[in-house]
Amino acid sequence: MDTPTDTWRPPLIWRAAQLLARAVVGALARLRVSGEIPAHLRRGPLILAANHISPFDPIVMAAACRVRGVAPRIMATAGLFRAPVVGAAMRHAGHIRVDRGTAAVHQALDAAARAVAEGSVVLVYPEGRIGLDPGMWPERSKTGAARLALASGALVIPVAQWGAHEVLPYRAPQGLAGAVGRALLRRPEVRVRFGDPVDLSDIDPAAPGAARRATDRIIDAITDTLVPLRPDEPDRPRHVDPGRPSDTSRSHRRHQPPAT
């Protein structure tokens, strides 16, 4: 894609929030970041596609991106934007509101396309929800991230994270105080890995089923990136959250698991 002439720059409030996220994650967990983002991509245009396992994920991703020198614009649920203080901060920081389950949901993809065109890094959770796969592997996902990538030509880097589910439970803020107390004592390891760019060059955006094929390829790449982060938990996680429901209707599996 063409290099934007007027590249978006993250506002001070978002850079400060990333520093705060780094401090919060450091207090509650031991953050381990692996993989690289090439220097020429750190200011965009770029799409980061991450798995979603916990309400703590956005804070973990803000901290991990800070470690790698990236300030992404996050596609986030509309509920955050409706919160009195957080919503104003999200809007001012340039994040992108997603009104899931409404007729306005397509506006988020339009806003993300404009953000990429401005040279931004955009962080997307392709699953569209905290995953409910019993093994906590990435689910069969929505096609929004793939459609954004095919339309813009921006590179997609898969991002895998593991351990955030040990910090905050699925039903947070229910049980929040106890979870935070346990995390402060235990400081579980939270791992984030930036993978290799996903090759979508052979997919014709105009071909039937292109978005679904690209989506499956992105989810395969996130899964591949996640494998090394949980080598001793290949099937089910050791940490079980009793408040987390299970749903196999959107399970996604590679035909051939990658070598570890």
Image: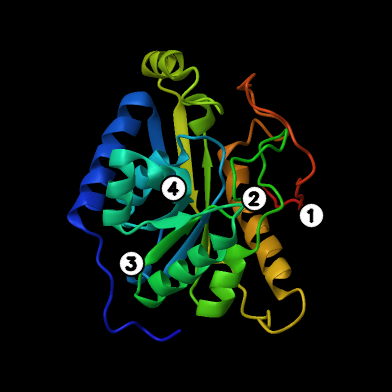
Picture residue at 58% right of the left edge, 51% below the top: 225
User: Is residue 127 among what the camera can see?
Assistant: yes
Q: Earlier in the sequence, mark 1 or mark 2?
A: 2
Between the residue at mark 4 and the residue at mark 3, the CA separation in whole angstroms equals: 15 Å
Report the front residue among 228 and 119. Answer: 119
Residue 69 shows in this picture:
no
Residue 38: numbered disc: none
The picture places residue 92, in percent across and down from the top left corner, at 26, 55
For the point 39% across and 47% down, the residue is 81
Relative horizontal placement of residue 218, taking residue 50 as reference (left or right): right
Q: Which mark is residue 223?
A: 2
Label 1 secondary element: loop
178 shown above or below 255? above
* Among the two numbered marks 1 and 4 on one chain, the one whose residue lies closer to the N terminus: 4
Q: Are marks 1 and 2 in contact (CB under 8 Å)?
A: no
Q: How is the image coloured?
A: rainbow
Earlier along the polypeptide chain: callout 2 or callout 4? 4
Amino acid type indicated by mark 3: Ala
Depth check, front residue: 247 or 233: 247
| The disc label shown at residue 34, or none | 4
Q: Earlier in the sequence, mark 3 or mark 1?
A: 3
Alpha-carbon span between mark 3 and mark 1: 32 Å
In front: mark 2 or mark 4? Answer: 2
Please state the total of marks drawn on the protein image.
4
Of the image marks 4 and 3, the number of the one nearer the N terminus: 4
Left/right placement of residue 187 relative to residue 249 reads: left
According to the picture, the residue beneath numbered tag 3 turns out to be 39
| Label 1 crowd bin: few (<14), some (14–19), many (20+), radius 10 Å | few
Neighbour tally class for label 4: few under 14, some 14-19, many 20 plus, Cα within 10 Å: some
